[in-house]
Image: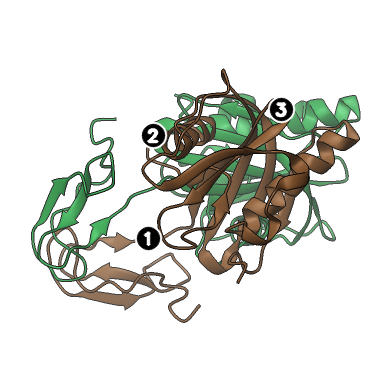
Chain colours: A brown, B green
Amino acid sequence: MDDKPLGTRLSFCPHCAAKLLIEIPTGDNMPRYTCGACNTVLYENPKLVVGCVAEFDDRILLCKRAIEPRLGYWTVPAGFMELGETLAQAAARETLEEACATVTLGSMLAIVDVPEASQVHVFYRGTLDEGRYAAGDESLEADLWAPDDIPWDEIAFRSGQIALKQFLAQKEAGIEQLHTEIALRNRRD
Amino acid sequence: MDDKPLGTRLSFCPHCAAKLLIEIPTGDNMPRYTCGACNTVLYENPKLVVGCVAEFDDRILLCKRAIEPRLGYWTVPAGFMELGETLAQAAARETLEEACATVTLGSMLAIVDVPEASQVHVFYRGTLDEGRYAAGDESLEADLWAPDDIPWDEIAFRSGQIALKQFLAQKEAGIEQLHTEIALRNRRD
């Protein structure tokens, strides 16, 4: 949290290359990076991470991460939302990229605030079309896991663990609700 | 949409001031601004706008905008989420800033994708504490509106209109659900 509220350390204006200042702009109430040469204010805001708990034949799709952070740990397919996307498009794209799987998305399952990382994580329910999947570029493996076999101690992130537990508990209870939670720390180690 | 997928036009690396390139980084699949000098990749992602449909004595708090876009139009208190916040903190802060009102937040009311603007808008239900409010710095006026008097033709943004309509319809029906919708255009003019 040492860089908050300014987030990333920035030095030069991306528009005119002048040295950036840190000041509270007129009409604002917190410090921002500003450019005295071209009057740009650089706003930094939280990012959306979007994913999917996708099921096929009562088993759940997980990917073993091939990249840091948490390389070698299992995760539900999820990643940063891109410009121009909807939440649902991002969830489906991440599932395709990480697990080479096309999904039919269902309802929104969980929204997890991760304020420490300035992130909001959104998870959908989904069903794997035709049950096809494979490891994408960012995954070492992709596999379907029966609920009783899920490797809880090897799940990469707390938000994914929350989404998985909610998916299973709600399915067991025969309900579909949006679960909201704040994860003060998202790393599980 | 002319700048998509690159969003804002950027020219210089904010870390080292070298001229930025546009290229697909190794392991990525879409063009990004990258720095050949210090290897920075500048990712741009959608922003979260968070707000609150706040009620007191069966009337709803709206603010008349003192700033562009849509200066002079009415809006539910809402604005860009800041680094380090939770969604609920952002909703409460925006209500305080725009309407000088403290709210007790209820459940999440609506999530509206605004892909054209690369934004996701999240609205909570809320109750005004003690019924106190006033125009904040970004508002010309703040006022409580009876449902039948809401100036629908003067509501600033489609997402706020969606949230207001859902709030009233669900209250009438005695339910509280999360409404999700895609607003292809958010400007109402």
Tag 1: amino acid: Tyr
Residue named by callout 3: B165
Q: Are marks 1 and 2 on the same chain?
A: yes
* Mark 3 surroundings: few (<14), some (14-19) or many (≥20) residues within 10 A: some
Q: Which residue extends farthest bottom?
A: A2
Q: Quadrant of residue A56?
A: top right
Q: Quadrant of residue A143?
A: top right
SS at mark 3?
Answer: helix
Q: Spatial distance from mark 1 to mark 3, Cα to Cα? A: 31 Å
> B183 or B62: nearer the eye?
B183
Tag 3: amino acid: Lys
Q: Is residue B108 above or below residue B96?
A: above
> B184 or A36: nearer the eye?
B184
Q: Spatial distance from mark 1 to mark 2, Cα to Cα? A: 19 Å
Residue named by callout 2: A84
Q: Is residue A98 above or below residue B50?
A: above
Report how many numbered discs are placed on residues in the image: 3
SS at mark 1?
Answer: loop
Relative placement, left or right, of B6 versus A102 is: left
Where residue B153 sits: x, y (%)? 58, 24
Residue named by callout 1: A43
Chain letter of disc 1 in the image: A
Chain letter of disc 3 in the image: B
Of pointers 1 and 2, the one earlier in the residue sequence? 1
Front: mark 1 or 3: 1
Relative placement, left or right, of B120 versus A110 is: left
Residue B156 showing in the rendered view = no
What's the mark number on residue B101? none
